[in-house]
C-alpha cells in the first residue's frame, strides 16, 4: 500500500496529525506536508482541520473505510502465506452509555483483555449520541429503537422498561391505579426522556408531563427514584436488582416501555473488519445473549429469596 495511504489511516485512527506523527516518528510539519500531497494527488479534500479537532470530509470518510478494509485484507493475506495464526491485536475504541457501561460492560472487560492481551482497548462512556467517524470509535453500544442509518448492527438483547417507585414514596403519596393517575404524582426523567412512550392493553400511549427534578443525568433520576422522590420509567438492566430486593416496586404493570427499544452493537460496515473488532463483537454476543447478566442476576436473587 502507498505510504501516504497508511499515513492517512493513522491520522484518522489517532485523531490528528500530531498524535499520528508521534506513532510514526514523523514531525507534524512533515505529516501536514504528506497529507497535503495526498489530497493534491487525489484532487479532493480529505479532512477539515481546526484548532480543536479533525473531521473527515465525505471523500475522506469513503477513503478511510476503503483503506481500512484493504489493510485488513493485506494482513490476512500475509498471515495465510506465513502460516501465522490470526491474533486479534491493535487499537480498539469502544463507546457506551455512561450508566450501562459502568454497570454492565466495565465489570466484564477483564475477561476480554485476558483472552486478547494484544488488543489496545479504549473505552469512552457518554450519554451523547456518538458519531462513530467523528469519535473514531470502532464499535458503540446503543440503547435505542433504531441502531442508526448506514451502520452495521447486532441486536444483543431486549431493553424492558417498567414504571416504578420506592415503597416509601408509594406509602406517602399512594399507588397509582390507572395511567391517568400519574398526572397527580411526581414524575422523574432526564432531559429529553418525557413524554414516556408506553405499550398498554390498548396499544401505544404517551404519558406527558414534566420531571419533578430537572436533570441531564439518568443516574440522578435513578437515585431520586430509589430514595423516594418520585415515579420513574427505568430499564430492567438499571433497576432489576433493586426491584428484586424490594427497594423499588413496579406499578401499573400492564404498561411498559416500547419493546422496539433494544441494546445494539453498531460499527461501520466494512468487508474485512479487523480481528480485534470481530473478537469484541463475539465477546458482546456471549455476554448479553441469549440472557443478559442483569436478567441472570435477578433470577439468582429470586431463587435465593425462596
Image: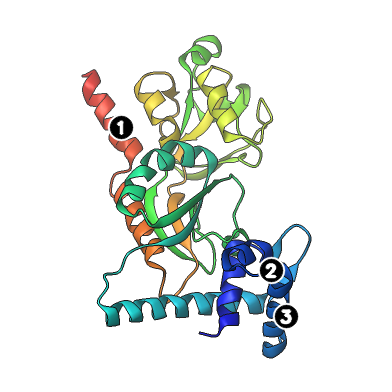
Badge 1 element: helix
Q: Sequence-wise, which precedes: disc 1 or disc 2?
A: 2
Contact flag, marks 1 and 2 (Cβ < 8 Å) = no
Residue at left 59%, top 62%? Answer: 14
Nearer to us in this view, 126 or 306: 126
Badge 2 element: loop
User: Which label sits on residue 36?
Assistant: 3
Residue 256, quarter of picture: top left
Relative horizontal placement of residue 127, taking residue 157 as reference (left or right): right
Nearest to the eye among marks 2 and 3: give it: 2
Badge 3 element: helix
User: Which label sits on residue 27?
Assistant: 2
Residue 89, x across and y down, in percent: 39, 62
Relative horizontal placement of residue 299, taking residue 253 as reference (left or right): left
Residue 16, x across and y down, in percent: 66, 64
Residue 37, x across and y down, in percent: 70, 84
Q: Residues within 10 Å of mark 1 (few under 14, many from 20)?
A: some
**What residue did someone put label 1 on?**
297
Q: Can residue 42 be seen in this snapshot?
A: yes
Whether residue 252 is situated above or below residue 24 in the rendered picture: above
Residue 154, quarter of picture: bottom left
Nearer to us in this view, 306 or 93: 93
Amino acid at each position: 500500500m502507498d505510504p501516504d495511504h497508511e499515513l492517512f489511516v493513522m491520522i484518522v485512527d489517532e485523531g490528528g496529525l500530531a498524535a499520528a506523527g508521534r506513532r510514526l516518528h514523523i514531525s507534524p510539519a512533515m505529516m501536514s506536508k504528506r497529507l497535503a500531497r495526498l489530497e493534491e494527488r487525489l484532487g479532493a479534500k480529505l479532512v477539515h482541520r481546526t484548532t480543536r479537532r479533525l473531521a473527515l470530509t465525505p471523500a475522506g470518510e469513503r477513503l478511510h473505510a476503503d483503506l481500512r478494509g484493504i489493510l485488513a485484507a493485506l494482513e490476512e493475506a500475509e498471515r495465510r502465506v506465513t502460516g501465522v495464526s490470526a491474533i486479534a491485536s491493535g487499537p480498539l475504541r469502544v463507546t457506551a452509555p455512561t450508566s450501562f457501561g459502568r454497570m454492565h460492560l466495565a465489570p466484564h472487560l477483564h475477561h476480554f483483555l485476558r483472552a486478547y492481551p494484544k488488543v489496545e482497548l479504549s473505552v469512552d462512556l457518554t450519554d451523547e449520541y456518538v458519531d462513530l467517524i467523528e469519535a473514531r470509535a470502532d464499535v458503540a453500544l446503543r440503547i435505542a429503537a433504531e441502531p442508526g442509518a448506514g451502520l452495521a448492527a447486532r441486536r444483543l438483547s431486549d431493553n424492558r422498561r417498567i414504571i416504578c417507585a420506592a415503597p416509601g414514596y408509594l406509602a406517602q403519596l399512594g399507588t397509582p391505579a390507572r395511567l391517568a393517575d400519574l398526572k397527580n404524582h411526581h414524575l422523574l426523567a432526564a432531559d429529553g426522556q418525557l413524554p414516556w412512550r408506553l405499550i398498554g392493553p390498548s396499544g401505544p400511549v404517551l404519558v406527558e408531563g414534566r420531571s419533578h427534578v430537572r436533570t441531564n443525568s439518568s443516574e440522578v433520576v435513578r437515585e431520586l427514584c430509589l430514595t423516594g422522590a418520585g415515579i420513574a420509567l427505568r430499564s430492567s438492566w438499571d433497576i432489576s436488582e433493586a426491584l428484586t430486593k424490594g427497594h423499588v416496586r413496579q406499578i401499573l404493570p400492564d404498561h411498559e416501555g416500547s419493546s422496539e427499544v433494544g441494546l445494539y452493537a453498531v460499527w461501520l460496515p466494512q468487508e474485512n473488519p479487523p480481528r480485534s473488532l470481530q473478537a469484541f463483537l463475539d465477546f458482546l454476543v456471549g455476554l448479553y445473549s441469549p440472557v443478559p447478566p442483569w436478567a441472570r442476576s435477578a433470577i439468582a436473587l429470586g431463587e435465593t429469596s425462596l
